[in-house]
Amino acid sequence: MKSFIVLSLIVLLSGCSALSKFIPSNFDNAEFGKLVELNVVSMSVNAKTEDWCNPMIIGQMNYRAEWLYTYSKYRLNDNITQVYKGIHGLTTELIEREAPSSAYCKIKRQSIHKITSDTLTVFGSRKS
């Protein structure tokens, strides 16, 4: 009888962990703040020079994307982690590209901006 109860508890707990990926996480202001920063920085460009490949700005973007990815890994929500993993992959491609053209940087940064805008819309609607 005791082994049946233990087995039932194990099955119940494993079922709860499998369902947790479908339950939205609570709103997290630290995470949301960094996501907003990445969104804004992704479209920051000097109006006079239109230097889309500025290494300092790209470095800031990569730092924020890596921060979000690392932070989310320890929040135990695989869906959110996968979103940030994808964003970090884009910033990593951008920073590792040798002598990228301005058009490449602009398109990549616009893509990052679009993804972060969409993510802000979804994550901003989470209940606190």
Image: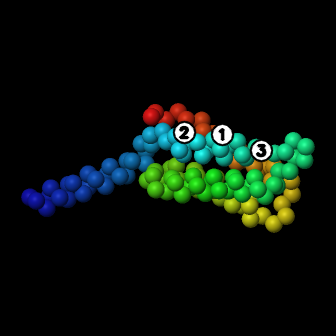
Q: Quadrant of residue 96?
A: bottom right
Q: Which residue is mark 3?
A: 44
Q: Position of residue 78 (x, y in %)?
A: 48, 53
Q: From mark 1 to mark 3, how far is it between C-alphas?
A: 14 Å
Q: Residues within 10 Å of mark 3 (few under 14, many from 20)?
A: some
Could you say which disc has been placed on residue 117 in the image?
A: 1
* x 55%, y 35%: residue: 124
What kind of residue is marked 1?
Ser
Going from N to C along the chain, the mark reached first, 2 or 3, is: 3
In the image, which is nearer the foreground, mark 2 or mark 3?
3
What kind of residue is marked 3?
Ser
Closest to the observer: 40 or 11? 40
Going from N to C along the chain, the mark reached first, 1 or 2, is: 1
* Quarter placement of the N terminus: bottom left
Q: From mark 2 to mark 3, how far is it between C-alphas?
A: 22 Å
Question: Which residue ends up furthest to the left in the rendered image?
Answer: 1
Could you say which disc has been placed on residue 123 in the image?
A: 2
Q: Position of residue 99 (x, y in %)?
A: 85, 64
| Horizontal relation, residue 18 to residue 93: left or right | left
* Contact, mark 1 vs mark 2 (Cβ under 8 Å): no
Q: Is residue 126 above or below residue 112?
A: above
What kind of residue is marked 2?
Phe
Closest to the observer: 128 or 126? 128
* Quarter placement of the C terminus: top left
Please say whether residue 67 is visible from this viewpoint. Answer: yes
| Horizontal relation, residue 29 to residue 62: left or right | left
* x 67%, y 56%: residue: 62
Going from N to C along the chain, the mark reached first, 1 or 3, is: 3
